[in-house]
Image (cartoon, coloured by chain):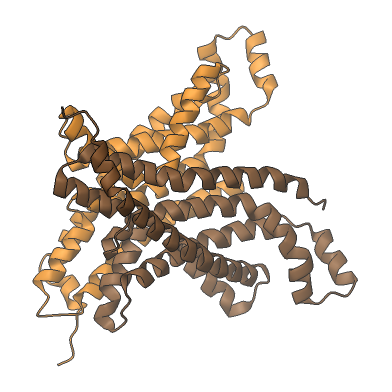
């Protein structure tokens, strides 16, 4: 019967799905790492209104937020090699994810920084903190607590966005499912494992962030 | 000789073909956005109801749409429906269906946020005046909530336009596919065509989404007070 699920098939291909999940996690890890660095840099540059860098960050954020990852990846993977800049698939996917995620992280950090009261900054200045000390000891710790929920949401967003990397020839969950459908016509099994794979990755992460968010509420600082 | 790949863009009907490709995704996005906006309002209002079972169902639907990537939903509807129920949707129909289901969930959450942000006394006063439930929503709640949900709804529109770029993965011939065709047919003549074509596509998406997201941000700031 067509409606039954072939468990032997599922058992046979589970190792491949686990491998693909590993790739997705790896991509997400590096994408998030570089996004955080880019985002923090852009947010600080804009917060302190550093002349040239500030407008460069503004242009970057607009470009990144208003274009889809698919298009960014096509340009990076197929467009740039034509003018002499080549990437391998993995680097390309991480670059695309970081380019996309950086602006989302920047906006999250900005929200955090803007939530800090003027009194905090003025008190810091009045006790003689330098600008960098002010960022490190006063602004950032508080901004992070405020920005945490948005940062967590961005991590989940980036993990979901990795679902398009098959277009740069990476064997992720999507491409595996598509191959299994095409090769064996086991549509149900392949789709079932695809959904299970993403749920196994995403549900714990989303639970963890929800838990962390509740804990962080206690760290609300007065202005 | 120095190769001018950018020439490919203006040669023959290439530019028109790319723009027609853009129209394919824009049409899918437009239809899905229109359905989502209309269906999202009742869905959002349902989410604010007190009935626990109803609330759980709505919540479950929203979370399911959110936690699973849209591309996975596209696969489920495009491949899964045909396999199990012999419903052979065209790729475009599957795309419209999935984007509408997803958009309705997201729009519903925006509506829920706007409706619950209204004060309790708005409901209580309306009830005291003897308005029926339908009149309450029609004359009191929706007009006030509308203003609070417009920026979110516009923002959702840009997200949906961006997400429709996924349809190339279920085989719809849209701008990227047309771009590929142009690049391949000019491969020997101008090897750098890929750079210019994909660059232009990138730029086209940008000028399509940027004004909309600007508008959303401006409205949000203006209506904050």
Q: Quadrant of residue A189?
A: top left
State the residue in front, A176 or B2.
Answer: A176
State the residue in front, A8 or B210.
Answer: A8
The chain coloured brown is A
Horizontally, is A219 left or right of B203 in the view? right
Q: Residue at x 11, y 74 (%)?
A: B186
Quadrant, the N terminus of chain A: top left
Q: Quadrant of residue B107?
A: top left
On the image, the x and y values in percent for residue B39 come to 39, 28
- The image shows a total of numbered marks equal to 0
Q: Colour of chain B?
A: orange
Q: Is residue A45 above or below residue B211?
A: below
On the image, the x and y values in percent for residue B135 come to 53, 13
On the image, the x and y values in percent for residue B130 come to 61, 6
Q: Residue at x 50, y 34 (%)?
A: B109
Which residue appears farthest toward the right when viewing the image?
A127
Which residue appears farthest toward the bottom when viewing the image?
B1
Horizontally, is A137 left or right of B152 in the view? right
Which residue appears farthest toward the top when viewing the image?
B130
Q: Is residue A90 above or below residue A6?
A: below
Q: Residue at x 51, y 68 (%)?
A: A34
Residue A91 visible here: yes
State the residue in front, A153 or B34.
Answer: A153
Q: Quadrant of residue A136?
A: bottom right
Residue A67 visible here: no
Q: Is residue B93 above or below residue A140?
A: above
Q: Residue at x 21, y 79 (%)?
A: B192
On the image, the x and y values in percent for residue B112 come to 54, 30
Horizontally, is A60 left or right of B93 in the view? right
Q: Is residue A61 above or below residue A198?
A: below
């Amino acid at each position: 019967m067509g409606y039954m699920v072939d468990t032997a098939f599922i058992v046979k291909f589970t190792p491949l799905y686990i491998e693909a999940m590993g790739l997705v996690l790896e991509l997400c890890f590096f994408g998030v790492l570089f996004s955080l660095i880019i985002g923090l840099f852009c947010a600080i540059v804009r917060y302190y209104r550093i002349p040239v860098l500030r407008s460069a960050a503004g242009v970057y954020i607009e470009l990144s937020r208003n274009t889809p990852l698919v298009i960014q990846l096509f340009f990076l993977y197929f467009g740039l090699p034509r003018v002499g800049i080549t990437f391998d698939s993995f680097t390309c996917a991480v670059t695309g994810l970081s380019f996309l995620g950086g602006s989302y992280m920047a906006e999250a950090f900005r929200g955090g920084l803007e939530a800090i009261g003027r009194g905090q900054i003025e008190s810091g200045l009045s006790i003689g903190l330098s600008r960098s000390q002010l960022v490190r000891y006063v602004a950032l710790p508080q901004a992070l607590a405020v920005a945490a929920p948005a940062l967590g949401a961005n991590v989940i967003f980036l993990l979901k966005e990795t679902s398009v990397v098959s277009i740069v020839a990476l064997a992720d969950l999507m491409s595996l499912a598509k191959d299994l459908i095409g090769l064996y016509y086991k549509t149900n099994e392949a789709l079932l494992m695809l959904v299970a794979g993403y749920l196994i990755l995403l549900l714990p992460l989303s639970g963890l962030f929800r838990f962390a968010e509740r804990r962080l509420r206690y760290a609300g600082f007065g202005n | 000789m120095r190769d001018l790949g950018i020439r490919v863009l203006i040669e023959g009907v290439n530019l028109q073909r790319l723009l027609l490709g853009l129209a394919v995704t824009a049409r899918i996005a437009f239809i899905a956005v229109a359905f989502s906006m209309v269906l999202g309002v009742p869905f959002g209002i349902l989410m604010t109801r007190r009935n626990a079972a109803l609330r759980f169902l709505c919540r479950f639907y929203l979370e399911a749409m959110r936690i699973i990537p849209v591309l996975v939903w596209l696969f489920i509807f495009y491949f899964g429906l045909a396999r199990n129920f012999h419903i052979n949707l065209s790729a475009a129909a599957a795309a419209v269906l999935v984007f509408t289901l997803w958009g309705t969930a997201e729009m519903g959450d925006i509506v829920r946020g706007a409706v619950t942000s209204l004060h309790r006394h708005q409901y209580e006063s309306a009830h005291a005046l003897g308005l029926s439930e339908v009149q309450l929503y029609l004359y009191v709640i929706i007009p006030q909530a509308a203003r609070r949900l417009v920026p979110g709804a516009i923002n959702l529109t840009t997200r949906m336009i961006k997400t429709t770029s996924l349809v190339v993965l279920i085989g719809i011939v849209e701008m990227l596919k047309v771009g590929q065709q142009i690049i391949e047919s000019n491969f020997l003549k101008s090897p750098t065509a890929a750079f210019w074509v994909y660059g232009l596509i990138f730029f086209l998406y940008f000028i399509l989404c940027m004004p909309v997201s600007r508008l959303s941000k401006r409205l949000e700031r203006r209506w904050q007070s």
